[in-house]
Amino acid sequence: MSDLRLDATQLDRYSRHVIMDEVGPEGQKRLLDGSVLVVGAGGLGSPAIQYLAAAGVGRLGIVDDDVVERSNLQRQIVHGDDDVGRPKVESAADYVAQLNPDVEVETREARLTTETVEGLLEGYDVVLDASDNFATRYLLNDHCVLTGTPLSHGAIYRFEGQVTTFTNDRGDEGDGDESGAAADGERPPCYRCVFPEAPEPGTVPDCATTGVLGVLPGTVGCIQATEVVKFLLGKGDLLEGRLLMYDAMGMTFEEVPVRQNPACPVCGEDPEIESIHDAAYEGTCSLTAD
């Protein structure tokens, strides 16, 4: 941690953090020294970006290769009507600059591929997956597992959402303070453990086809941001080993336990994926044929 001290303005801005025993000045310094990469500046990324910036996460990376469309505005709340046609990373960065000058924003207007992922993700403490396609999710997972980078996963569909956290801590021991899986002495799961294969292309329609409740990604994205803040603070119980399912219509939350799969091709006992170049991330995201 750097020798960063909170100045008078910061003490005022983060006063509701500073007075909490679980955060305090030292915790706020940890947030200001922290770095998070948000992949996707859309429905999930918008609330995550807002609250991570408001919390004072010092370095915030935003990756997205899309531009703002008017149909986005029903749920992608870091963008406004005047931003239609602009790159989403630019619009999101302007929002953060207006919200909190303490936050350094790094915009990356690019598509995540096997050629770009290493350069885009390097140097961040945590990755928050706010993407909307399976290829990106598997690519992010594999890279984060291989580099030991914590990953927050969120996904939405119509009225439903899901969230979990993958710490990707492959150590043999854990103190149990931050993850239920480590507390039991088990290796933590990864995305492939929970979802071994992607659906066949075209079998899962996107929100442009089926629609999505505009407030749904706000709930899910906020939970992702909460998990990231807790991780940076080193406080609380993360959703590692637990998949949180949210039904907005029934206003219910269901927790499903998930475990590491010994046969997982990337984090299992005999991994087949030892490099992101060992898998194909388009189509069904299967292993590359020999």
Image (cartoon, helix red, strand yellow):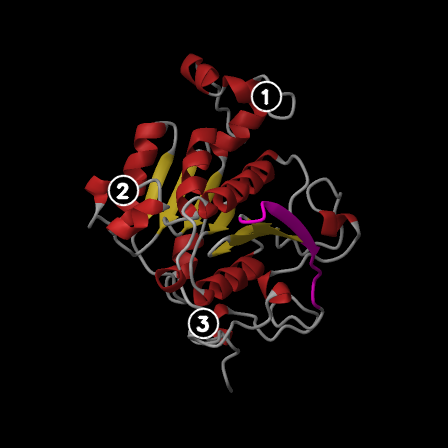
The one nearer the camera, 13 or 168, is: 13
Q: Which range of residues does the magenta coloring cover? A: 249-261
For marks 2 and 3, the one nearer the N-term is 2
Q: Which residue is drawn at 53% across and 61% down?
A: 141
Question: Residue 263 falls in which quadrant of the image?
Answer: bottom right
The kind of secondary structure element at disc 2 is: helix
Residue 233 in view here: yes
Q: Is residue 240 visible?
A: no
| Amino acid type shown at disc 2 | Ser
Distance from the alpha carbon under mark 2 to that under mark 3: 28 Å
- Between the residue at mark 3 and the residue at mark 1, the CA separation in whole angstroms equals 42 Å
Residue 24, disc: 1
Q: Quadrant of residue 269?
A: bottom right
Q: Say whether residue 195 is magenta.
A: no
Q: Do the residues labelled 3 and 1 touch (CB within 8 Å)?
A: no
Q: Quadrant of the N terminus?
A: top right
Regarding mark 1 in the picture, which secondary structure is present there? helix
Q: Residue 251 magenta-drawn?
A: yes
At mark 3, the secondary structure is loop
- Report how far apart the C-alphas of labels 2 and 1 lie in the structure: 32 Å
Q: Do the residues labelled 2 and 3 touch (CB within 8 Å)?
A: no
Residue 281's label in the rendered image is 3
**Of the residues shown, which amino acid type is indicated by label 1?**
Gly
Looking at the image, which residue sits at the far bottom? 290
Please tell me the numbered disc located at residue 91.
Answer: 2
